[in-house]
Image: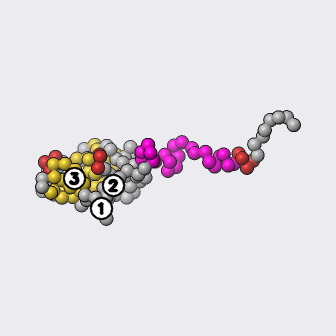
């Protein structure tokens, strides 16, 4: 014997299958350090004062994963900012455009519509209302 151990073909194949490749596949989409999916509200969540979102304005509530916009007539709309592509929290609002940091999907914060792939599904709309001067979003259905 030469003293050198040669891995069997089975060992080599097993290693190849079990070794993750960085940057590929769903593991690359991990939304957080702990791998947990970002939370969408599961109960009504108070976002802030009614006056924080002026007519025609859009505001991102990062901690709640919710974006709120107010139309010119004063009506409110809210959307979950959990990306519909692979579940990353979208923490970037450029004007009225939400930009996902994971793969670059873009959404219209006022309508939830996809502006740029890879996402193909609009953001989830959340019921929103003003209660005692506070903006409150509820879980979507
Ligand atoms: Fe892939 Fe948002 S999770 S673009």
Q: Depth-wise, is mark 3 or mark 1 nearer the camera?
A: 3
Disc 3 and disc 2 in contact, CB within 8 angstroms: no
Front-lying residue, 32 or 123: 32
Horizontal arrangement in the rendering, residue 51 relative to residue 125 (left or right)? left
Q: Which residue is mark 3?
A: 46
Horizontal arrangement in the rendering, residue 13 relative to residue 139 (left or right)? right
The percent coordinates of residue 76 (x first, y second) are: 18, 56
Q: Residues within 10 Å of mark 2 (few under 14, many from 20)?
A: some
Residue 12 appears in which quarter of the rendering?
A: top right
The percent coordinates of residue 118 (x first, y second) are: 42, 52
Q: Which residue is mark 2?
A: 40
Q: Residues within 10 Å of mark 1 (few under 14, many from 20)?
A: some
Q: In the image, is the residue at mark 1 within 8 Å of ligand 1 by its beta carbon? A: no
Q: Is residue 111 visible?
A: no
Question: Which badge, 2 or 1, is on the more N-terminal residue?
Answer: 2
Horizontal arrangement in the rendering, residue 104 relative to residue 46 (left or right)? right
Q: Residue at 30% x, 56% y: name it.
A: 41
Q: In the image, is the residue at mark 3 within 8 Å of ligand 1 by its beta carbon? A: no
Tell me where the magenta segment starts and ends, as one range: 13-35
Disc 2 and disc 1 in contact, CB within 8 angstroms: yes
Q: Secondary structure at mark 1?
A: loop
In space, the residues marked 3 and 2 are separated at their CA atoms by: 13 Å
Q: Residue at 29% x, 46% y: name it.
A: 63
Judged from this view, the residue extending furthest toward the bottom is 141
Q: Residue at 44% x, 43% y: name it.
A: 33
The percent coordinates of residue 117 (x first, y second) are: 40, 51
Horizontal arrangement in the rendering, residue 34 relative to residue 112 (left or right)? right
Q: Is residue 87 visible?
A: yes
- Against 46, residue 95 (above or below) is above
The percent coordinates of residue 18 (x first, y second) are: 62, 48
Q: Which residue is mark 1?
A: 140
């Amino acid at each position: 014997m030469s003293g050198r151990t040669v891995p069997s073909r089975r060992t080599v194949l097993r290693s190849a299958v079990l070794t993750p490749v960085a940057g590929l596949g769903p593991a690359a989409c991990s939304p957080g350090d702990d791998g947990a999916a970002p939370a969408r509200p599961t109960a009504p969540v108070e976002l802030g004062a009614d006056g924080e979102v002026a007519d025609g304005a859009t505001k991102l509530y990062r901690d709640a994963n919710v974006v709120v916009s107010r139309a010119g007539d004063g009506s409110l709309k809210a959307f979950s900012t959990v990306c519909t592509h692979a579940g990353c929290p979208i923490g970037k609002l450029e004007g009225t455009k939400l930009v996902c940091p994971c793969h670059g999907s873009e959404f219209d914060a006022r309508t939830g519509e996809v502006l740029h792939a890879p996402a193909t599904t609009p953001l989830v709309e959340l019921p929103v209302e003003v209660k005692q001067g506070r903006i409150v979003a509820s879980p979507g259905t």
